[in-house]
Image (tube, grey):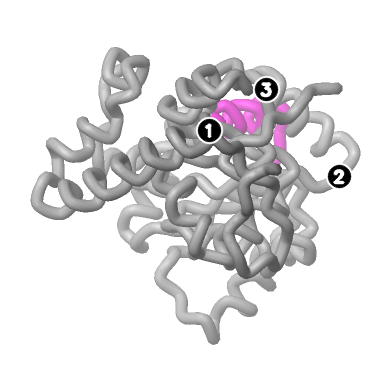
Amino acid sequence: MPHHRQLLYGMYMDAVRMEDVIDRCHAALATRSRMLLGVLNAAKIVKLRNDTLLRNSLLECDLLLADGQSIVWASKLLRRPLPERIAGIDVFDRLLGLAHQEGRTVALLGAQPDVLCRLEEVIRTRFPGLKIACSHHGYFTPDEADQVAGAIRASGADMLFIGMTSPKKEIFLATYGPTLNVPVLHGVGGSFDIMAGLTKRAPLAWQRAGMEWAYRLLQEPRRLWWRYLATNTSFIRLTAREMIRPSRAFEPDSPAKPTAAE
């Protein structure tokens, strides 16, 4: 399934639509080949420039998708357009549907134990008969990571969803992904909390307006206001810089920021 990529902020992003992503995952399941999904939003664009571990884990992805509407808008402004926003939680939901339809098994990793139990209940209610081959909370220590990875490997799951924060989930996937023998791997961030009903997702109108961040800010203003102010300001500054001097592509293990193209 051919598609093209766009170089944005030093990262090659896949110019695909949701159906393309699901088709690629379906093909990976059929051939038992790896499909490591990565998603980028404005916050990650800012953070990855100085976070080598996060950046390298994203460079390993087989598909790198625009999770934030701001990235899609910026891509059009920069004349390197991406066709649409592909939110990680929507991919999660669609892949659960695919697993249910085809009798595939899934593994869940992340969230607090009680939230994970609630998520399993929701999945079993929405997708009756869907087999959860492995499930583990996200609050394990580094010393326990090998054991967690071993349990996932032994489960024989077809899909792995990781509901942990960045860069922990990207680092886990980059470290253990190649040895898990799981075809489809997707880090879904806070999607476990949302699907379990712990937090609310922004209404569709807010999503389409690219204002999900503002909806989250309204729910937790004291914790999030400075983070969003700093991130959004930095992203706007980076976009302005991209308009003048586009960044060169990052390379794995590169310790420095990309330099502007000559």
Taken as a whole, is the magenta stretch helix, strand or loop?
helix
The residues colored magenta run: 91-105
Which quadrant would the C terminus be assigned to in this image?
Answer: top right
Location of residue 2 in the rendering, given as x and y in whole percent from the top left corner = 85, 22
Report which quarter residue 207 is drawn in: top left
Ranked by sequence position, the earlier of labels 3 and 1 is: 3
Task: Find residue 32 and name its label.
Answer: 2
Left/right placement of residue 225 relative to residue 143 reads left
Query: Where 210 falls versus 225 (above or below)?
Result: above
Observer-nearest residue: 27 or 157? 27
Between the residue at mark 2 and the residue at mark 1, the CA separation in whole angstroms equals 43 Å
What amino acid is found at the position of numbered circle 1 in the picture? Ile
Cα distance between the residues tagged 2 and 3: 22 Å
Query: Disc 1 marks which residue?
Result: 244
Q: Where is residue 213 in the image (x, y as percent from the top left)?
A: 28, 35
Q: Which amino acid, mark 3? A: Val
The answer to whether residue 174 is seen in the rendering is: yes
Q: Is residue 213 magenta?
A: no
Residue at the spot 50% in from the left edge and 19% down from the top edge = 77
Query: Which amino acid type is shown beneath numbered disc 2?
Result: Arg
Query: Are circles 3 and 1 on residues that touch, CB within 8 Å?
Result: no
Q: Is residue 199 above or below residue 254?
A: above
Q: Residue at x 48, y 46 (%)?
A: 45
Q: Helix or strand or loop: what does disc 2 sit on? A: loop
Residue on which the image places disc 3 = 16
Q: Kindly report which numbered mark, 2 or 3, lies closer to the viewer in this rendering.
A: 3
Q: Nearer the viewer, residue 62 or 242?
A: 242
